[in-house]
Image (cartoon, grey):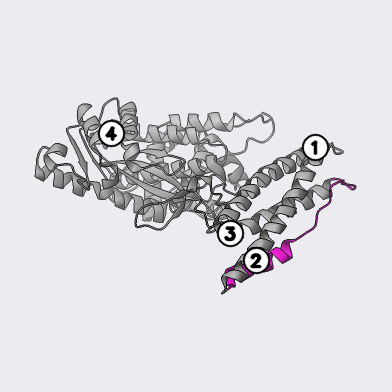
Amino acid sequence: MRQKFNPQWNLFTTMARNQIAKELQQMSKVLDATPKVVELAYQDLTRSARPTTGREGMNAEQVLRCAILKQHRQLTYEELAFHLEDSDAFRSFSRLEMGQYPSKSVLQENIKFLLEETWEAILREIIGYAENEKIETGRKVRVDATCVETDIHHPTDSSLLSDGIRIITRWLAEGKELSPTPHYEYSDHRRVVKKRLLLVLNAKKEVVREGAYKDLLMYAGKVREYAIAAIPELYAHKGQDISDLFAGRVLAENLERAVGLLGKVIDQTDRRVFKKESVPASEKVVSFFEDHTDIIVKKRRETEFGHEIFLTGGASNMILDCLILRGNPADSEQYIPMLERHKDNYGRMPRQISADGGFASKDNLAYAKGHGVKDAVFAKKRGLSVLDMAKSAWVYKVLRNFRAGIEAGISILKRAFGLDRCTWKGWEGFRRYVLSSIVSYNLLVLARREYRGQPLTWDIRAICYLIT
Protein backbone atom coordinates (compact mmCIF):
# COMPACT_ATOMS: atom_id res chain seq x y z
CA MET A 1 0.00 0.00 0.00
CA ARG A 2 1.37 3.40 -0.98
CA GLN A 3 2.31 5.76 1.86
CA LYS A 4 2.36 9.56 2.05
CA PHE A 5 5.86 9.77 3.51
CA ASN A 6 8.31 7.83 5.65
CA PRO A 7 7.58 8.65 9.32
CA GLN A 8 11.24 8.21 10.33
CA TRP A 9 14.43 9.23 8.61
CA ASN A 10 17.43 6.99 8.24
CA LEU A 11 20.07 7.73 10.91
CA PHE A 12 22.78 8.10 8.27
CA THR A 13 20.90 10.62 6.10
CA THR A 14 23.07 13.72 5.68
CA MET A 15 23.43 16.58 3.22
CA ALA A 16 26.62 17.55 1.43
CA ARG A 17 28.20 20.94 2.04
CA ASN A 18 28.38 22.27 -1.53
CA GLN A 19 26.13 25.12 -2.69
CA ILE A 20 23.69 22.96 -4.68
CA ALA A 21 23.18 20.68 -1.68
CA LYS A 22 22.58 23.66 0.62
CA GLU A 23 20.00 25.05 -1.80
CA LEU A 24 18.29 21.66 -1.90
CA GLN A 25 18.25 21.63 1.89
CA GLN A 26 16.49 25.01 1.98
CA MET A 27 14.02 23.84 -0.66
CA SER A 28 13.37 20.78 1.49
CA LYS A 29 12.58 22.99 4.48
CA VAL A 30 10.00 24.93 2.43
CA LEU A 31 8.35 21.66 1.39
CA ASP A 32 8.30 20.46 4.99
CA ALA A 33 6.65 23.75 5.99
CA THR A 34 3.86 23.14 3.46
CA PRO A 35 2.66 19.60 4.29
CA LYS A 36 -0.48 19.98 2.16
CA VAL A 37 1.60 19.54 -1.01
CA VAL A 38 2.26 15.91 -0.04
CA GLU A 39 -1.46 15.39 0.54
CA LEU A 40 -2.19 16.76 -2.95
CA ALA A 41 0.35 14.40 -4.53
CA TYR A 42 -0.98 11.47 -2.49
CA GLN A 43 -4.51 12.02 -3.80
CA ASP A 44 -3.28 11.80 -7.40
CA LEU A 45 -1.13 8.73 -6.78
CA THR A 46 -3.93 6.81 -5.06
CA ARG A 47 -6.58 7.76 -7.61
CA SER A 48 -5.50 5.03 -10.03
CA ALA A 49 -7.20 1.64 -9.67
CA ARG A 50 -4.20 -0.27 -8.36
CA PRO A 51 -3.99 -3.13 -5.85
CA THR A 52 -3.31 -2.12 -2.25
CA THR A 53 -1.22 -5.21 -1.56
CA GLY A 54 2.33 -6.08 -2.50
CA ARG A 55 5.32 -3.73 -2.56
CA GLU A 56 4.76 -0.21 -1.30
CA GLY A 57 6.80 1.46 -4.03
CA MET A 58 7.61 5.16 -3.88
CA ASN A 59 5.59 7.18 -1.39
CA ALA A 60 3.89 10.45 -2.34
CA GLU A 61 6.60 12.65 -0.82
CA GLN A 62 9.33 10.86 -2.76
CA VAL A 63 7.44 11.15 -6.05
CA LEU A 64 6.82 14.88 -5.58
CA ARG A 65 10.41 15.60 -4.59
CA CYS A 66 11.80 13.56 -7.50
CA ALA A 67 9.54 15.49 -9.91
CA ILE A 68 10.77 18.82 -8.50
CA LEU A 69 14.36 17.62 -8.65
CA LYS A 70 13.95 16.57 -12.28
CA GLN A 71 12.68 19.99 -13.31
CA HIS A 72 15.11 21.86 -11.07
CA ARG A 73 18.17 20.18 -12.60
CA GLN A 74 16.61 19.61 -16.05
CA LEU A 75 17.32 15.90 -16.09
CA THR A 76 15.96 13.14 -18.26
CA TYR A 77 14.39 10.20 -16.43
CA GLU A 78 17.51 8.15 -17.14
CA GLU A 79 19.76 10.89 -15.74
CA LEU A 80 17.47 11.32 -12.73
CA ALA A 81 17.65 7.59 -11.95
CA PHE A 82 21.45 7.72 -12.20
CA HIS A 83 21.83 10.74 -9.89
CA LEU A 84 19.37 9.32 -7.36
CA GLU A 85 21.69 6.32 -7.09
CA ASP A 86 24.96 8.23 -7.27
CA SER A 87 24.37 11.50 -5.34
CA ASP A 88 23.91 11.63 -1.57
CA ALA A 89 22.49 15.16 -1.84
CA PHE A 90 19.85 14.10 -4.35
CA ARG A 91 18.95 11.02 -2.32
CA SER A 92 18.62 13.09 0.86
CA PHE A 93 16.41 15.66 -0.83
CA SER A 94 14.21 12.91 -2.32
CA ARG A 95 13.99 11.11 1.06
CA LEU A 96 14.86 7.74 -0.47
CA GLU A 97 15.46 4.81 1.87
CA MET A 98 18.60 2.68 1.97
CA GLY A 99 18.52 0.22 -0.90
CA GLN A 100 15.78 2.13 -2.71
CA TYR A 101 16.93 2.88 -6.27
CA PRO A 102 13.97 3.70 -8.55
CA SER A 103 14.52 3.03 -12.24
CA LYS A 104 13.73 5.52 -15.00
CA SER A 105 10.51 3.66 -15.87
CA VAL A 106 9.34 3.70 -12.24
CA LEU A 107 10.08 7.43 -11.97
CA GLN A 108 8.25 8.22 -15.20
CA GLU A 109 5.27 6.07 -14.27
CA ASN A 110 4.85 7.77 -10.89
CA ILE A 111 5.56 11.38 -11.87
CA LYS A 112 3.04 11.30 -14.72
CA PHE A 113 0.23 10.70 -12.19
CA LEU A 114 0.60 14.26 -10.85
CA LEU A 115 -2.11 16.25 -12.66
CA GLU A 116 -1.90 19.84 -13.87
CA GLU A 117 -4.53 20.89 -11.33
CA THR A 118 -2.35 19.40 -8.61
CA TRP A 119 0.71 21.33 -9.76
CA GLU A 120 -1.34 24.52 -9.79
CA ALA A 121 -2.55 23.82 -6.23
CA ILE A 122 1.05 23.13 -5.15
CA LEU A 123 2.05 26.47 -6.68
CA ARG A 124 -0.66 28.18 -4.60
CA GLU A 125 0.64 26.47 -1.44
CA ILE A 126 4.22 27.63 -2.10
CA ILE A 127 3.03 31.19 -2.70
CA GLY A 128 0.94 30.99 0.48
CA TYR A 129 4.09 30.04 2.40
CA ALA A 130 5.90 33.07 0.96
CA GLU A 131 2.99 35.30 1.98
CA ASN A 132 2.93 33.93 5.54
CA GLU A 133 6.68 34.46 5.86
CA LYS A 134 6.32 38.08 4.65
CA ILE A 135 8.49 37.30 1.63
CA GLU A 136 5.83 38.15 -0.97
CA THR A 137 2.73 40.29 -0.39
CA GLY A 138 1.36 40.54 -3.94
CA ARG A 139 0.96 44.30 -3.61
CA LYS A 140 3.46 45.14 -6.35
CA VAL A 141 3.39 42.89 -9.43
CA ARG A 142 4.57 42.74 -13.02
CA VAL A 143 2.97 40.96 -15.95
CA ASP A 144 4.48 39.60 -19.15
CA ALA A 145 3.94 36.87 -21.73
CA THR A 146 6.21 34.39 -23.44
CA CYS A 147 5.95 31.39 -25.74
CA VAL A 148 6.94 27.84 -24.76
CA GLU A 149 7.63 25.67 -27.78
CA THR A 150 6.37 22.12 -28.12
CA ASP A 151 8.70 19.28 -29.05
CA ILE A 152 8.21 19.27 -32.83
CA HIS A 153 10.37 19.86 -35.87
CA HIS A 154 9.86 22.95 -38.02
CA PRO A 155 6.68 22.17 -39.98
CA THR A 156 6.59 22.29 -43.78
CA ASP A 157 3.88 20.91 -46.04
CA SER A 158 6.21 18.30 -47.51
CA SER A 159 7.51 17.10 -44.13
CA LEU A 160 3.96 16.89 -42.74
CA LEU A 161 2.81 14.79 -45.70
CA SER A 162 5.81 12.52 -45.18
CA ASP A 163 5.11 12.23 -41.44
CA GLY A 164 1.48 11.29 -42.05
CA ILE A 165 2.34 8.66 -44.64
CA ARG A 166 5.08 7.22 -42.43
CA ILE A 167 3.11 6.83 -39.19
CA ILE A 168 -0.07 5.56 -40.87
CA THR A 169 1.93 2.95 -42.78
CA ARG A 170 3.62 1.89 -39.55
CA TRP A 171 0.27 1.48 -37.77
CA LEU A 172 -1.17 -0.45 -40.73
CA ALA A 173 1.77 -2.84 -40.44
CA GLU A 174 1.13 -3.27 -36.71
CA GLY A 175 -2.53 -3.96 -37.47
CA LYS A 176 -1.57 -6.77 -39.84
CA GLU A 177 0.47 -8.41 -37.10
CA LEU A 178 -2.64 -8.65 -34.89
CA SER A 179 -4.49 -10.90 -37.31
CA PRO A 180 -2.96 -13.63 -39.49
CA THR A 181 -5.57 -13.05 -42.22
CA PRO A 182 -6.43 -9.33 -42.38
CA HIS A 183 -8.99 -8.27 -44.98
CA TYR A 184 -7.50 -4.86 -45.74
CA GLU A 185 -4.55 -4.38 -48.08
CA TYR A 186 -1.97 -1.61 -48.26
CA SER A 187 1.29 -0.78 -49.99
CA ASP A 188 4.39 0.71 -48.37
CA HIS A 189 5.21 3.98 -50.18
CA ARG A 190 7.66 5.29 -47.59
CA ARG A 191 10.76 4.89 -49.75
CA VAL A 192 9.42 6.80 -52.74
CA VAL A 193 7.88 9.42 -50.44
CA LYS A 194 11.28 10.04 -48.86
CA LYS A 195 12.76 10.61 -52.33
CA ARG A 196 10.01 13.11 -53.22
CA LEU A 197 10.55 14.89 -49.89
CA LEU A 198 14.24 15.36 -50.64
CA LEU A 199 13.35 16.54 -54.14
CA VAL A 200 11.04 19.21 -52.71
CA LEU A 201 13.75 20.39 -50.34
CA ASN A 202 16.53 20.51 -52.94
CA ALA A 203 14.69 21.45 -56.16
CA LYS A 204 15.95 24.64 -57.80
CA LYS A 205 13.05 25.00 -60.21
CA GLU A 206 9.45 25.58 -59.17
CA VAL A 207 8.17 23.16 -61.83
CA VAL A 208 10.23 20.32 -60.35
CA ARG A 209 9.07 21.18 -56.83
CA GLU A 210 5.39 21.25 -57.83
CA GLY A 211 5.79 17.90 -59.59
CA ALA A 212 7.21 16.38 -56.41
CA TYR A 213 4.32 17.88 -54.41
CA LYS A 214 1.81 16.28 -56.80
CA ASP A 215 3.39 12.88 -56.20
CA LEU A 216 3.34 13.43 -52.44
CA LEU A 217 -0.36 14.32 -52.55
CA MET A 218 -1.09 11.25 -54.68
CA TYR A 219 0.67 8.89 -52.25
CA ALA A 220 -0.90 10.64 -49.25
CA GLY A 221 -4.34 10.10 -50.76
CA LYS A 222 -3.63 6.40 -51.33
CA VAL A 223 -2.36 5.88 -47.77
CA ARG A 224 -5.38 7.71 -46.39
CA GLU A 225 -7.69 5.34 -48.31
CA TYR A 226 -5.78 2.33 -46.96
CA ALA A 227 -6.32 3.58 -43.41
CA ILE A 228 -10.02 4.32 -43.92
CA ALA A 229 -10.51 0.73 -45.11
CA ALA A 230 -8.56 -0.70 -42.16
CA ILE A 231 -10.25 1.25 -39.34
CA PRO A 232 -13.56 -0.74 -39.23
CA GLU A 233 -11.70 -4.06 -39.24
CA LEU A 234 -9.39 -3.00 -36.40
CA TYR A 235 -12.37 -1.79 -34.35
CA ALA A 236 -14.05 -5.17 -34.90
CA HIS A 237 -10.91 -7.16 -34.07
CA LYS A 238 -11.59 -9.48 -31.13
CA GLY A 239 -8.26 -11.20 -30.63
CA GLN A 240 -7.36 -14.16 -28.50
CA ASP A 241 -7.04 -12.22 -25.22
CA ILE A 242 -7.97 -8.86 -23.75
CA SER A 243 -4.62 -7.28 -24.69
CA ASP A 244 -5.20 -8.06 -28.39
CA LEU A 245 -8.67 -6.56 -28.18
CA PHE A 246 -7.40 -3.28 -26.75
CA ALA A 247 -4.42 -3.22 -29.14
CA GLY A 248 -6.75 -3.30 -32.14
CA ARG A 249 -8.97 -0.58 -30.72
CA VAL A 250 -5.98 1.67 -29.91
CA LEU A 251 -4.63 1.26 -33.43
CA ALA A 252 -8.04 2.08 -34.90
CA GLU A 253 -8.32 5.24 -32.78
CA ASN A 254 -4.79 6.31 -33.73
CA LEU A 255 -5.51 5.76 -37.41
CA GLU A 256 -8.81 7.64 -37.19
CA ARG A 257 -7.06 10.65 -35.66
CA ALA A 258 -4.17 10.50 -38.17
CA VAL A 259 -6.56 10.23 -41.13
CA GLY A 260 -8.31 13.42 -40.05
CA LEU A 261 -5.01 15.27 -39.67
CA LEU A 262 -3.67 13.96 -42.98
CA GLY A 263 -6.82 15.15 -44.73
CA LYS A 264 -6.23 18.68 -43.37
CA VAL A 265 -2.57 18.56 -44.45
CA ILE A 266 -3.57 17.49 -47.97
CA ASP A 267 -6.07 20.35 -48.14
CA GLN A 268 -3.66 23.00 -46.86
CA THR A 269 -0.90 21.79 -49.20
CA ASP A 270 -3.21 22.01 -52.21
CA ARG A 271 -4.35 25.50 -51.23
CA ARG A 272 -0.87 26.84 -50.46
CA VAL A 273 1.24 25.22 -53.21
CA PHE A 274 -1.13 25.01 -56.16
CA LYS A 275 -3.87 27.56 -55.49
CA LYS A 276 -1.43 30.06 -53.93
CA GLU A 277 -3.85 30.79 -51.08
CA SER A 278 -2.90 32.10 -47.66
CA VAL A 279 -4.23 29.56 -45.15
CA PRO A 280 -5.20 31.06 -41.77
CA ALA A 281 -3.08 29.89 -38.83
CA SER A 282 -6.17 28.52 -37.06
CA GLU A 283 -6.78 26.09 -39.95
CA LYS A 284 -3.22 24.79 -40.25
CA VAL A 285 -1.82 21.51 -38.96
CA VAL A 286 1.77 21.74 -37.73
CA SER A 287 2.36 18.28 -36.22
CA PHE A 288 0.97 14.74 -36.20
CA PHE A 289 2.48 14.07 -32.77
CA GLU A 290 1.71 17.30 -30.85
CA ASP A 291 -1.42 18.34 -32.72
CA HIS A 292 -2.38 20.79 -29.95
CA THR A 293 0.49 23.05 -31.01
CA ASP A 294 -0.47 26.63 -31.87
CA ILE A 295 1.22 29.02 -34.28
CA ILE A 296 2.38 32.05 -32.30
CA VAL A 297 2.95 35.12 -34.48
CA LYS A 298 4.36 38.32 -33.01
CA LYS A 299 5.32 41.48 -34.85
CA ARG A 300 9.00 41.71 -35.77
CA ARG A 301 9.66 38.24 -34.32
CA GLU A 302 10.10 34.79 -35.78
CA THR A 303 7.04 32.56 -35.83
CA GLU A 304 7.03 30.12 -32.91
CA PHE A 305 5.21 26.82 -32.52
CA GLY A 306 3.89 26.07 -29.05
CA HIS A 307 1.66 27.87 -26.58
CA GLU A 308 1.71 31.32 -25.07
CA ILE A 309 1.83 31.62 -21.29
CA PHE A 310 1.09 34.74 -19.23
CA LEU A 311 3.10 35.24 -16.05
CA THR A 312 2.58 37.45 -13.01
CA GLY A 313 5.76 38.14 -11.04
CA GLY A 314 6.21 39.72 -7.63
CA ALA A 315 8.80 41.91 -5.96
CA SER A 316 10.45 38.76 -4.55
CA ASN A 317 11.14 37.49 -8.12
CA MET A 318 8.69 34.64 -7.56
CA ILE A 319 6.13 33.75 -10.24
CA LEU A 320 2.78 34.33 -8.55
CA ASP A 321 0.50 33.13 -11.34
CA CYS A 322 0.65 31.40 -14.70
CA LEU A 323 -2.09 31.37 -17.34
CA ILE A 324 -1.63 28.85 -20.18
CA LEU A 325 -3.85 29.42 -23.20
CA ARG A 326 -4.64 27.83 -26.54
CA GLY A 327 -4.56 29.82 -29.76
CA ASN A 328 -2.70 33.07 -30.37
CA PRO A 329 -4.45 35.56 -28.03
CA ALA A 330 -3.51 39.23 -27.98
CA ASP A 331 -1.68 40.35 -24.85
CA SER A 332 -4.12 43.20 -24.29
CA GLU A 333 -7.01 40.72 -24.02
CA GLN A 334 -5.41 38.93 -21.06
CA TYR A 335 -4.66 41.95 -18.84
CA ILE A 336 -8.06 42.01 -17.13
CA PRO A 337 -8.19 38.18 -16.65
CA MET A 338 -4.75 38.29 -15.03
CA LEU A 339 -5.93 41.01 -12.62
CA GLU A 340 -9.04 39.00 -11.79
CA ARG A 341 -6.98 35.87 -11.14
CA HIS A 342 -4.71 37.87 -8.84
CA LYS A 343 -7.73 39.10 -6.91
CA ASP A 344 -9.04 35.54 -6.57
CA ASN A 345 -5.68 34.36 -5.24
CA TYR A 346 -4.97 37.23 -2.82
CA GLY A 347 -8.47 38.51 -2.10
CA ARG A 348 -7.56 42.00 -3.32
CA MET A 349 -6.15 43.83 -6.30
CA PRO A 350 -2.45 44.78 -6.34
CA ARG A 351 -1.56 48.31 -5.31
CA GLN A 352 0.83 48.70 -8.27
CA ILE A 353 1.10 46.75 -11.50
CA SER A 354 3.54 47.12 -14.37
CA ALA A 355 3.03 45.34 -17.69
CA ASP A 356 4.64 45.04 -21.10
CA GLY A 357 3.60 47.48 -23.82
CA GLY A 358 1.52 44.81 -25.55
CA PHE A 359 -0.98 44.93 -22.67
CA ALA A 360 -1.56 48.69 -23.02
CA SER A 361 -5.03 50.00 -23.85
CA LYS A 362 -7.39 52.63 -22.51
CA ASP A 363 -9.92 50.00 -21.46
CA ASN A 364 -7.32 48.04 -19.48
CA LEU A 365 -6.11 51.19 -17.73
CA ALA A 366 -9.68 52.23 -16.89
CA TYR A 367 -10.45 48.77 -15.50
CA ALA A 368 -7.35 48.73 -13.29
CA LYS A 369 -7.96 52.24 -11.96
CA GLY A 370 -11.63 51.51 -11.41
CA HIS A 371 -10.87 48.45 -9.27
CA GLY A 372 -8.46 49.98 -6.80
CA VAL A 373 -5.09 49.76 -8.56
CA LYS A 374 -3.27 53.02 -7.72
CA ASP A 375 -0.54 52.80 -10.36
CA ALA A 376 -1.08 50.80 -13.56
CA VAL A 377 1.97 51.29 -15.76
CA PHE A 378 2.69 49.99 -19.25
CA ALA A 379 6.20 49.82 -20.72
CA LYS A 380 4.95 51.66 -23.81
CA LYS A 381 2.51 54.55 -23.52
CA ARG A 382 0.49 53.83 -26.72
CA GLY A 383 -1.46 57.08 -26.47
CA LEU A 384 -1.74 57.01 -22.66
CA SER A 385 -0.31 59.82 -20.56
CA VAL A 386 2.15 59.19 -17.75
CA LEU A 387 -0.05 60.89 -15.14
CA ASP A 388 -3.02 58.73 -16.16
CA MET A 389 -0.99 55.61 -15.39
CA ALA A 390 0.97 56.72 -12.31
CA LYS A 391 0.78 59.53 -9.80
CA SER A 392 4.10 61.02 -10.97
CA ALA A 393 6.73 60.68 -13.66
CA TRP A 394 9.15 59.30 -11.06
CA VAL A 395 6.75 56.51 -10.05
CA TYR A 396 6.17 55.69 -13.72
CA LYS A 397 9.91 55.36 -14.32
CA VAL A 398 10.42 53.19 -11.23
CA LEU A 399 7.58 50.82 -12.18
CA ARG A 400 8.67 50.67 -15.79
CA ASN A 401 12.15 49.63 -14.66
CA PHE A 402 10.59 47.21 -12.17
CA ARG A 403 8.74 45.47 -15.01
CA ALA A 404 12.02 44.76 -16.77
CA GLY A 405 12.95 42.47 -13.89
CA ILE A 406 10.49 39.81 -14.99
CA GLU A 407 12.50 39.41 -18.19
CA ALA A 408 15.34 38.03 -16.06
CA GLY A 409 12.94 35.56 -14.44
CA ILE A 410 11.66 34.42 -17.84
CA SER A 411 15.24 34.03 -19.05
CA ILE A 412 16.10 31.82 -16.06
CA LEU A 413 12.94 29.76 -16.60
CA LYS A 414 13.88 29.19 -20.23
CA ARG A 415 17.59 28.54 -19.77
CA ALA A 416 17.69 26.69 -16.45
CA PHE A 417 14.19 25.23 -16.03
CA GLY A 418 13.41 24.11 -19.58
CA LEU A 419 10.62 26.55 -20.47
CA ASP A 420 12.18 27.19 -23.87
CA ARG A 421 10.82 23.84 -25.08
CA CYS A 422 8.39 21.41 -23.50
CA THR A 423 9.45 17.77 -23.80
CA TRP A 424 6.32 16.17 -22.29
CA LYS A 425 3.61 14.85 -24.59
CA GLY A 426 0.10 16.16 -25.10
CA TRP A 427 -1.79 19.26 -23.95
CA GLU A 428 -2.10 17.91 -20.40
CA GLY A 429 1.61 17.07 -20.38
CA PHE A 430 2.43 20.57 -21.61
CA ARG A 431 0.55 22.16 -18.70
CA ARG A 432 2.13 19.81 -16.18
CA TYR A 433 5.59 20.57 -17.55
CA VAL A 434 5.16 24.35 -17.37
CA LEU A 435 3.60 24.39 -13.89
CA SER A 436 6.12 21.93 -12.42
CA SER A 437 8.97 24.06 -13.79
CA ILE A 438 7.49 27.18 -12.17
CA VAL A 439 7.05 25.36 -8.83
CA SER A 440 10.72 24.29 -8.95
CA TYR A 441 11.79 27.83 -9.87
CA ASN A 442 9.83 29.35 -6.97
CA LEU A 443 11.35 26.87 -4.53
CA LEU A 444 14.82 27.83 -5.72
CA VAL A 445 14.00 31.56 -5.34
CA LEU A 446 12.88 30.93 -1.74
CA ALA A 447 15.91 28.75 -1.04
CA ARG A 448 18.38 31.33 -2.30
CA ARG A 449 16.58 34.05 -0.39
CA GLU A 450 16.77 32.15 2.89
CA TYR A 451 20.25 30.75 2.31
CA ARG A 452 22.89 33.30 3.32
CA GLY A 453 25.85 31.03 3.75
CA GLN A 454 24.87 29.94 7.29
CA PRO A 455 26.17 26.53 8.47
CA LEU A 456 24.01 23.52 7.84
CA THR A 457 21.32 22.80 10.43
CA TRP A 458 19.48 19.57 11.08
CA ASP A 459 15.97 19.25 9.78
CA ILE A 460 13.36 19.18 12.57
CA ARG A 461 12.20 15.68 11.54
CA ALA A 462 15.76 14.37 11.80
CA ILE A 463 16.16 15.93 15.25
CA CYS A 464 12.91 14.33 16.46
CA TYR A 465 14.09 10.98 15.12
CA LEU A 466 17.40 11.19 17.01
CA ILE A 467 15.62 12.23 20.23
CA THR A 468 13.21 9.30 20.08
Instruction: Return the residue at label 2.
Output: 212
Cα distance between the residues tagged 2 and 4: 65 Å
In the image, is residue 159 above or below residue 239? below
Q: Residue at x 50, y 54 (%)?
A: 87
**Label 1 sits on what residue type?**
Leu
Cα distance between the residues tagged 1 and 2: 40 Å
**Label 4 sits on what residue type?**
Glu
Q: Is residue 183 magenta?
A: yes
Residue 288 seen anywhere in this rendered image of the structure: no
Q: Earlier in the sequence, mark 1 or mark 3?
A: 1
**Label 3 sits on what residue type?**
Phe
Query: Disc 1 or disc 3, which is closer to the eye?
Result: 3
Labelled disc at residue 133:
4
Query: Disc 1 or disc 2, which is closer to the eye?
Result: 2
Badge 3 element: helix
Instruction: Return the residue at label 3.
Output: 274
